[in-house]
Image (tube, coloured by chain):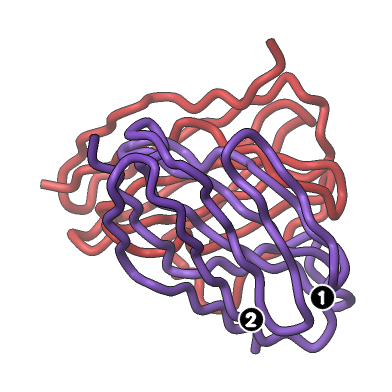
Chain colours: A red, B purple
Amino acid sequence: DAMVIQNPRYQVTQFGKPVTLSCSQTLNHNVMYWYQQKSSQAPKLLFHYYDKDFNNEADTPDNFQSRRPNTSFCFLDIRSPGLGDAAMYLCATSRLFNEQFFGPGTRLTVL
Amino acid sequence: EDQVTQSPEALRLQEGESSSLNCSYTVSGLRGLFWYRQDPGKGPEFLFTLYSAGEEKEKERLKATLTKKESFLHITAPKPEDSATYLCAVQEVGGTSYGKLTFGQGTILTVHP
């Protein structure tokens, strides 16, 4: 089945220790998104790509970066995680302006 | 700035007790309004897209409707397995984003047997 895959599902890191979350898709969608979702809150868009074109939300911290080496893969790098970065990180994909399909998420814990 | 407000924040129903969830939105130009279901610890699952006022979509016990200012998600004769958080999101026409969604806070639905 075509799908959005996120690895790992659970990630524990230490304060200040860099971490990378990955997302892959078999849907061949040209847009990929990274969202941060904290407990009982709405998903908050961090960045998105249309093919190689990168869009960064104005309020996304500099601590967060992303890479999209090809159509299928996208990575979220958190350079120096703080306690406030503990959250669920959701990857989504879509055809341009169509519905977004989400992966299962990566739960990040910062100790 | 786009705004999406969902009400109520939480809704508890008995099995078979029909009800509606509300999503009010403010956007300069609506490209689409999306409904998602999210189970605890999982990613949102797509339910419906609505594009224009008067449009309706149905899936099993769920029916979504759209006006110029709000959308409703009607749940008919709900079952315990319908328990989840229901998220509404809007997509705006124009701008530099590629299909960016602005989400509401969600309605937590609990259906008791």
Classify mark 2: helix, strand or loop.
strand
Q: Is residue A94 above or below residue A5?
A: below
Q: Are marks 1 and 2 in contact (CB under 8 Å)?
A: yes
- Of callouts 1 and 2, which one flags the residue occurring earlier in the amino acid sequence? 2
Q: Is residue A77 above or below residue B64?
A: above
The x, y position of residue A99, in whole percent, is 75, 47
The x, y position of residue A17, in whole percent, is 24, 45
What crowding class fits label 2: few (fewer than 14 Cα within 10 Å), some (14-19), or many (20 or more)?
many
Classify mark 1: helix, strand or loop.
strand
Quadrant of the snapshot with the N terminus of chain B: bottom right
Residue at 62%, 59% (x, y): give it: A47
The x, y position of residue A110, in whole percent, is 18, 47
Q: Amino acid at mark 2?
A: Tyr
Which of the 4 quarters of the picture holds residue A107?
A: top left
Return the chain for callout 1.
B
Judged from this view, the residue extending furthest toward the top is A1
Residue at 32%, 40% (x, y): give it: B15
Residue at 10%, 46% (x, y): give it: A111
Number of the label disc, if any, that sits on residue B97: none
Task: Decide if residue B25 is on the left or right side of residue B22.
Answer: right
Task: Decide if residue B65 is on the left or right side of residue B113.
Answer: right
Q: Is residue B45 above or below residue A5?
A: below
Estimate the spatial distance between the alpha carbons at disc 1 and disc 2, rounded to whole Å. 9 Å
Number of the label disc, if any, that sits on residue B25: 2
Towards the viewer: A27 or B65: B65
Which residue is disc 1 drawn over? B30
Task: Decide if residue A37 is on the left or right side of residue B70.
Answer: left
What crowding class fits label 1: few (fewer than 14 Cα within 10 Å), some (14-19), or many (20 or more)?
some
Q: Amino acid at mark 1?
A: Leu
Return the chain for callout 2.
B
Judged from this view, the residue extending furthest toward the left is A111
Task: Decide if residue B67 is on the left or right side of residue B72.
Answer: right
